[in-house]
Amino acid sequence: MKYLRSVRGRMLCIAFIPGGGLVVVALVIAFFLVHQAVRTSDLAMETAGAADRTARSVGVLQAQRSDAMAAPDHRAGAYANFTQRIDGAITGLRDYARRAPNAESGYQQTTAVELLSVAEGMDRSDSLALAGIDGVTRRPYAAAVAAYRADLTRVAPQLTESGRTAYESLTRSADWSRLAAVEDAFATAEPLPVPESTWRSAAYTVSQQLGRLYSQQSQYAVQLTLDDGRRTLAGALAAGTALLLFAGLLLVVVRRLVARVPVPVVPIMVPMAHAAIPRPRHARSRRPRTPEPWPLKAVLDDLRRF
């Protein structure tokens, strides 16, 4: 059997090695980026679900705390128990913010968690006020009011433009002023400056506004993470497609260049499967005999000798 191997074929095979490597690299990079984009999208949806569950859990625990604190004998224990559980739920949501795919989305999610903590601080002080302020609860009440006000002031510069607008609208509203006046009165053991119904209406409105501010910031943080996942996915597809096209173009160009190289085809003989049987020494071919000279020519040659 005989095989033909050409120098041109060798050159083409050698040229295909980097092209094939480039295709493999393109596929690996595209797979990695697509996996990262899918992971980012899943993390965003998981964070959104955790934020919604945490907000609902905090709302339920706040309502249970208010009901439990109605009994004077169990007021301190109920306040400490439910407050600890609410803080644990908020801490769990803060862990989701730490696992954000990038710094910006993590920053915005942390801001949303801080707003939820502010809303909880306001409700915490309100539950103490509803239960009745006395010499024992006055100090925790004043600390809770001061803490949520300071946290809200600290978080306000971190909000988005729409968030800062909502914050300014809240702090400049009449309900905020009425609630602040009542809180100051409770902290200093002074009479209420407004009727109780007005106070309760102002407290409800402020609580709702803080809840909306948290929801708005949380949705913005989740949307930011989703957008980052979409950008990562688009970049993965674009990079993979570009690398594949470049590899294909490289192979086409190399093939055309190699086709123009004038190289001969070098045959390579491959040994046969069965070896040839050697001829025996005694089997020799017959040598051709020397033809006898023509008789007339022999006579003439003899005459020339004389």
Image: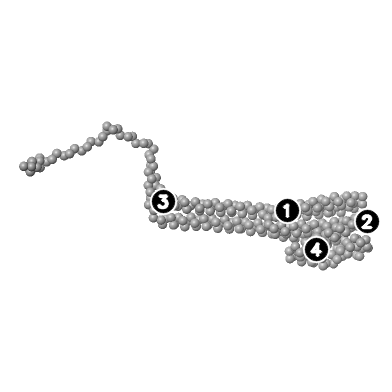
Q: Earlier in the sequence, mark 4 or mark 1?
A: 1
Q: Earlier in the sequence, mark 3 or mark 1?
A: 3
Label 4 vs label 3, nearer the camera: 3
Q: Is residue 190 left or right of residue 173?
A: right
Q: Would you say residue 197 is visible in this rendering?
A: no
Q: Quick one: 275 or 37, which is closer to the camera?
A: 275
Disc nearest the viewer among 4 and 1: 4
Q: Position of residue 195 (x, y in %)?
A: 91, 63
Mark 4 vs mark 3: which is more N-terminal? 3
Q: Quadrant of the N terminus?
A: top left
In this picture, residue 24 sits left or right of residue 126: left
Marks 3/2: CA–CA distance: 99 Å
* In the image: residue 98, left or right of residue 248: right
Give me the C-alpha separation between circle 2 and circle 4. Answer: 28 Å
Q: How many marks?
A: 4
Color scheme of the displayed model:
one colour
Residue 112 x, y percent position in the rendering = 75, 58
Categorize mark 3 by other alpha carbons within 10 Å: few (<14), some (14-19), many (20+). Answer: some
Name which of mark 2 and mark 4 comes first in the sequence. 2
Callout 2 touching callout 1 (CB < 8 Å): no
Residue type at the position of mark 1: Tyr
Residue denoted by label 3: 7
> Quick one: quadrant of the C terminus?
top left
Query: Whole-Å distance between the Cαs marked 4 and 3?
Result: 78 Å
Q: Of circles 3 and 1, which is in front? A: 3
- Quickly name the residue at label 2: 135
**Disc marking residue 96:** 1
Q: Which numbered tag is attached to residue 122? A: none
Mark 4: which amino acid? Thr
Contact check, label 4 and label 1, Cβ < 8 Å: no
Identify the residue position indicated by label 4 in the image: 153
Residue drawn at x 43%, y 55% is 258
